[in-house]
Image: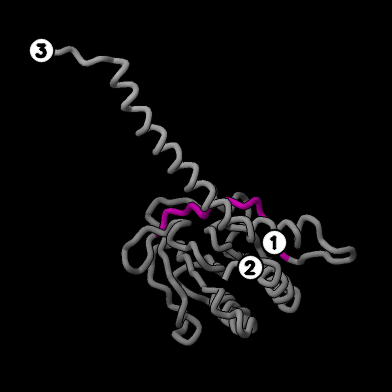
């Protein structure tokens, strides 16, 4: 029986490792190219704004949305499941009171106000108590709904902030990136969203 030559085995393995390394590098390059318009546009608008311009919404450290929740089809809510578009996010209880309905209505209005860019924004409702939302059908239409898993916490995502008292913006990479207080100054919120879409080329 012939004993395998270790040097020959190592030589044959090297091309495999090399191909894998090249594949990882290519994947990272593709991700960087996709992320560049969002990252650079956001930096241009919020980090180095023109003189005299102050954004209304609070810019959050970009981080993938990580919440233990499930969508209506049973799939887990992940940053990947939200990737590819901008999202306006409302976090609320299943028993949708007047403030809840007003938030959903405002998200619809903010989206429609973008005109030709309205298709770049979708709406998401995360229900915190796992119940079905009682929001009026008119304001819930077109909203993607996810229910928080039993025992799940929002602290890791929103920190000390009460998410029910805010509206949020998620970027096309699935990052939670901006918060607006509730009730907001609607014109200033609209202006932030309009300018953010304008400086980011992601469709």
- Horizontal arrangement in the rendering, residue 1 relative to residue 188 (left or right): left
- Provide residue 2's location: percent of width, then percent of height: 14, 13
Give the residues drawn in magenta, as a range.
57-69
Q: Quadrant where the N terminus lies?
A: top left
Query: For the residues carrying marks 2 and 3, which lies nearer the camera in this image?
Result: 3
Cα separation between marks 2 and 1: 8 Å
Q: Residues within 10 Å of mark 3 (few under 14, many from 20)?
A: few
Numbered mark located on residue 201 in the image: 2
Q: How is the image coloured?
A: one colour
Numbered mark located on residue 41 in the image: 1
Q: Residues within 10 Å of mark 1 (few under 14, many from 20)?
A: many
- Horizontal arrangement in the rendering, residue 150 relative to residue 124 (left or right): left
Under circle 2, the secondary element is loop
Front residue (pair 182, 68): 68
Q: Residues within 10 Å of mark 2 (few under 14, many from 20)?
A: few
Tell which circle, 2 or 1, labels the residue nearer the N-terminal end.
1
Numbered mark located on residue 203 in the image: none
Q: Do labels 2 and 1 touch, CB within 8 Å?
A: yes
Which residue of the protein is positioned furthest toward the bottom in this rendering? 138
Residue under the image location 66 percent in, 54 percent down = 60
Please tell me whether the stretch drawn in magenta is mainly helix, strand or loop: strand
């Amino acid at each position: 029986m012939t004993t395998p030559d270790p040097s020959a085995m190592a030589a044959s393995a090297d091309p495999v490792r090399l191909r894998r390394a090249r594949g990882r590098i290519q994947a990272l390059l593709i991700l960087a190219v996709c992320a560049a318009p969002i990252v650079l546009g956001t930096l241009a608008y919020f980090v180095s704004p023109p003189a005299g311009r102050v954004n209304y919404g609070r810019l959050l450290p970009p981080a993938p949305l990580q919440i233990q929740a499930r969508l209506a089809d049973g799939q887990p809510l992940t940053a990947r499941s939200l990737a590819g578009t901008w999202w306006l996010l409302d976090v609320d209880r299943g028993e949708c009171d007047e403030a809840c309905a007003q938030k959903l209505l405002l998200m619809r209005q903010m989206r429609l106000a973008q005109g030709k860019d309205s298709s770049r924004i979708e709406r998401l409702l995360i229900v915190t108590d796992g119940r079905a939302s009682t929001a009026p059908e008119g304001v819930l239409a077109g909203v993607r709904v996810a229910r928080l898993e039993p025992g799940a916490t929002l602290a890791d995502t929103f920190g000390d902030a009460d998410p029910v008292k805010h509206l949020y913006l998620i970027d096309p990479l699935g990052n939670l990136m901006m918060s607006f207080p509730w009730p907001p100054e609607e014109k200033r919120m609209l202006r932030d969203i309009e300018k953010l879409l304008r400086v980011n080329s992601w469709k």
